[in-house]
Amino acid sequence: MTGKATVTPWEVKGNIDYDKLIKEFGVSKIDDELLSRIEKHAKKKGLELHHMLRRGIFFAHRDLKFILDEYEKGNKFFLYTGRAPSGHTHMGHLVPWMFTKWLQDVFDVELWFQFPDDEKFLFKKELSLDDTKKFTYENMLDVIAVGFDPKKTHFIVDTEHAGIMYKEALKVAKCITFSTAKSAFGFTNEQNLGAIFYTAMQAVPAFLPNVLDGSRRPCLIPHAIDQDPHFRVSRDVIPKIGYDKPGSIQCRFLPGLGGMISDGKMSSSSGDNATVFTIDDAKTVKKKINKYAFSGGQATIEEHREKGGNPDIDVSYQWMTFFEEDDEQLKKLYSDYSSGKLLSGELKSILIEKLNSFLAGHQERREKAKKVIDKYIYRIKSP
């Protein structure tokens, strides 16, 4: 990281140096050999290698080779990711979910999706349990709208599924010292007890399916790089209670509208104007992008035509790298903007059209999700 950049499970800000982050967190860069192996499996399903892999948006991993080795031996893994419900879903949340959906399609595997409502209640003073319950429901609709297979997708809510999670969390917690928690998360003596215990609950879905069905499947966790400290601790502990270390695959952050340098990743707590939510209408999206998206263009049209813009710092272009799947179209945008052929306002218009087209379909699926939400929530079986 450069300057005063901060990356923790609860705060991301500043200009992130991802190569440095790889070394600091101890993750491994996804290399060409791993990409080729994943691409081989994608082609078997008639799919291309995901654009987020092609462009290095998903850029790092832990034990991805082990996961693929096991899969190619015939031992299917399962996926685990989640969403801590503290507000409405924004476009940044969708990035790992869209990729996770692709993984489910390619490898035909189960997804266990955790809603750790306890986390947000414990870490945000302003949130009540009623608040987290409301946002859990709202967030569930967005997850369903991404298109996960209801037969292979299981939602677990920490406060609702404590009956199957708490005993396993105790096993995890017994293996974690307060010293380890302080070192991993920066806790002080002022931290509430629940927050200190919470990481044990976040570890449970990485092996819970094996507890429930007596299997020995490996787990792969797609997530943004800021959540890695939780899973570093989990990987040290889970083998001590009899299960394999979970593998993980990490992605870069979708920058906030002000750019990574000013406000880090997109965040629900950054204010409505810095964030594009999945429930925003077309007019609102247009206003936010036009007014708040940081531009890499020049001060005047004449200067821009002469010198060109800088797509590497332009938020509209950066967002297109996440949401435009066509490599040739993206390459053309880069070239046209760099040369001055494409103006900043024109690039913003292209992004606005892309987002509103996407959100129109997403919001339609989101509304339909209200009728099928029960199909996704894991039902605890009676003994």
Image: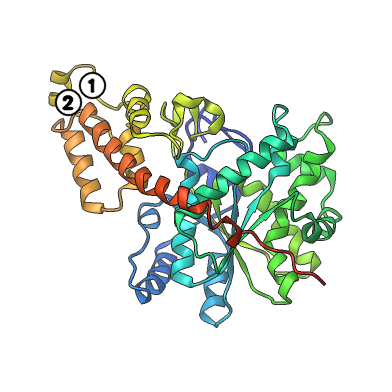
Residue position for label 2: 307
Residue 322 vs 13, above or below: the answer is: below
> At which x and y percent is residue 183?
75, 41
Query: Residue extending furthest bottom?
Result: 73
- In-image side of 179 versus 42 (left or right): right
Give the structural element (helix, strand or loop) at label 1: loop
> Which residue is pictured at 40% across the width and 57% down the height?
53
- x, y percent for residue 198: 76, 45
Q: Quadrant of residue 67?
A: bottom right
Quadrant in which the C terminus appears: bottom right
Which quadrant of the view contains residue 136?
top right
Residue type, numbered disc 2? Lys
Residue 86: where, in percent of width, then height?
Answer: 62, 36
> What residue is shown at x 34% (from left), y 25% (from top)?
287
What colouring style does the render use?
A: rainbow
Q: Is residue 112 visible?
A: no
> In the image, which disc is placed on residue 59?
none
Q: Nearer the viewer, residue 114 or 221?
A: 114
Foreground: 349 or 313?
349
Which numbered disc flags the more N-terminal residue, 1 or 2?
1
Identified at 60% across, 45% down, the residue is 137
Q: Residue furthest top?
A: 300
Q: Mark 1 highlights which residue? A: 298
Q: Is residue 173 left or right of residue 254?
A: right
Q: Residue at x 37, y 26 (%)?
A: 288
